[in-house]
Image: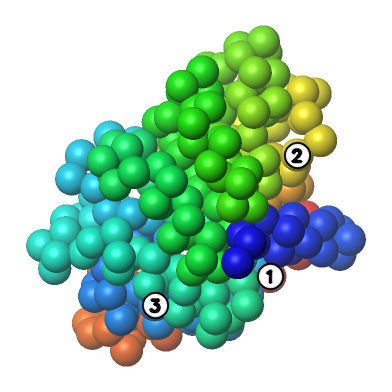
Amino acid sequence: MSGNVELLNTALAQAKAEDRAALIAYLPAGFPTVDGAIEAVKEVVAGGADIVEVGLPHSDPVLDGPVIQTADDIALRGGVKIADVMRTVREAHEATGAPILVMTYWNPIDRYGVERFTAELAEAGGAGCILPDLPVQESELWREHADKHGLATVFVVAPSSKDERLATITAAGSGFVYAASLMGVTGTRDSVGDQAQDLVRRTRATTDLPVCVGLGVSNARQAAEVAGFADGVIVGSAFVKAMLDAPDEAAGLAAVRSLAGELAEGVRKR
């Protein structure tokens, strides 16, 4: 079974054709349980997410904030394994038809085996991987196997990335480019928003790939703001927080569906 990178490309192209940004939701596998995470993916797609990133929980998630760290900790204490991540991708994709990517640090893939991981992800119907800590210059083995299985390789760029470095990263990637930034605390948001907009502009100068922004977006107004300059709006912590804050799983599922609906409206108001 070939991977679903084409499904990812189609979802992004469809959003562009509708003159809007794509809504990309992030949820960790195994949180609150393996079954609960699968249901959560179904709910965010039902609410309006175009694409979903399933996080592979890691014991040292250096790039994630406290909300996602808390969820990862719950998932790891629950015993989540890579097999559960693959099951999450498979069942969520089969139920929704949406492109599902895995977001993971490199170490778990390296330990599991690149060939095994890519083959299983493609077989599960996965669209690809977001690899925030894999340096492009060390990615040849991964890309070779990802290409063989029809999987997208999404690299992360940051405001600190120089133009020459951006060109190197975007030339190696596929699917889309993940532009990482932070909203910052109250009072600094305007300047950080400018920083993200500048990063998107500089990244687009190097590639035809869609540029999607993960920027601490948590509501429709912020989603609309980012949708004004990006091809996709990536939301993670807000979904995870909605689940964490809910009194029970059913309420959490209703909350993520509702939030997806609000954000889906937001990306249509660019």
Pick the quarter of the image with the C terminus: bottom right
Q: Residue at x 10, y 62 (%)?
A: 77
Q: Residue 255 in the image: state x and y as whole percent.
A: 41, 79
Q: Residue 25 in the image: state x and y as whole percent.
A: 52, 62
How far, Cα to Cα, is label 3 from label 1?
A: 23 Å
Number of other residues with Cα within 10 Å of mark 2, as a class: few under 14, some 14 to 19, many 20 or more: some
Identify residue type, mark 2: Leu
Q: Earlier in the sequence, mark 2 or mark 3?
A: 3
Q: Earlier in the sequence, mark 2 or mark 1?
A: 2
Tag 3 near tag 1, CB within 8 Å: no
Residue 265: mark: 1
Give the side of residue 84 with respect to residue 47, left or right.
left
Number of other residues with Cα within 10 Å of mark 3, as a class: few under 14, some 14 to 19, many 20 or more: many
Q: Which residue is drawn at 75% across and 39% down?
A: 209
- Residue 196 drawn above or below residue 97: above
Q: Which residue is drawn at 81% across and 35% down?
A: 208
Number of other residues with Cα within 10 Å of mark 1, as a class: few under 14, some 14 to 19, many 20 or more: some
Give the side of residue 126 with respect to residue 57, left or right.
right
Residue 38: mark: 3
Give the side of residue 42 with respect to residue 270, left or right.
left
